[in-house]
Amino acid sequence: MSLHYLLDGYNIINQVPRFCEGTLEDRRLRLLAWLNIVRPQGSARNAVTVVFDGDPRYFGRPPCGCARVIFTAGESADDCLKRMVERSPAKKKLVVVSDDKDIKLYARALGAGVLGVGEFAADLVRRRDKKTKTRPVSVKGAEGKHISLTQAQKINKEFERIWLP
């Protein structure tokens, strides 16, 4: 039984530090290359569709490899992902990858599987941890709210820029 992974493209490239730097096109291409090389979706039989907001005319090079790429000109990626789950005849074979709570709840309610970005990109997290010899952390803000590792890194860089000239 092969699965079909539906990826919230910008959600992933904004959450995984490896994809957070460079031009938007570089970041998208890095994600697609990673999908081709590492294959976090598992078996080559598992289909992968990456959904990005926006117009495909602004994507310099046509995508190639194992992932199908959809640009949602005129529609949000969130709405497109929801519609894809809704219209699928095999919802139980879908796995939606996003950290967007609304998308995850919607997909789960329709019978699709869901994965958070951290779970899907665990290979990247493990490799980073081996290099830095640290574990991923959950940082609590002053009001007990959680901030992502990416947000914490951005805050640290900003503090370094301001306080350590």
Image (spheres, rainbow, N blue to C red):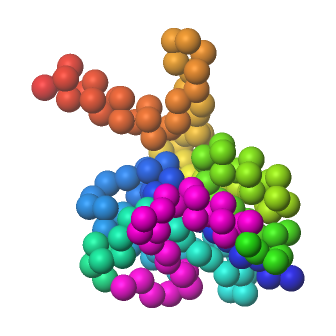
Identify the residue at image location x=31%, y=83%: 61
Magenta-colored span: 62-86
- Residue 82 counted in the magenta span: yes
The quarter of the displayed image where residue 151 is located: top left
Q: Position of residue 20 (x, y in %)?
A: 37, 53
117 versus 139 height, above or below: below
Q: Nearer the viewer, residue 60 or 130?
A: 60
Q: Position of residue 29 (x, y in %)?
A: 38, 73
Q: Is residue 131 visible?
A: no
Q: Nearer the viewer, residue 37 or 51?
A: 51
Identify the residue at image location x=36%, y=29%: 155
Please state the total of marks drawn on the protein image: 0
Residue 53 horizontal side relative to residue 23, left or right:
right
Classify the position of the N terminus by image quarter. Answer: bottom right
Identify the residue at image location x=62%, y=77%: 48
Residue 127 horizontal side relative to residue 56, left or right:
right
39 versus 139 height, above or below: below
- Residue 47 counted in the magenta span: no
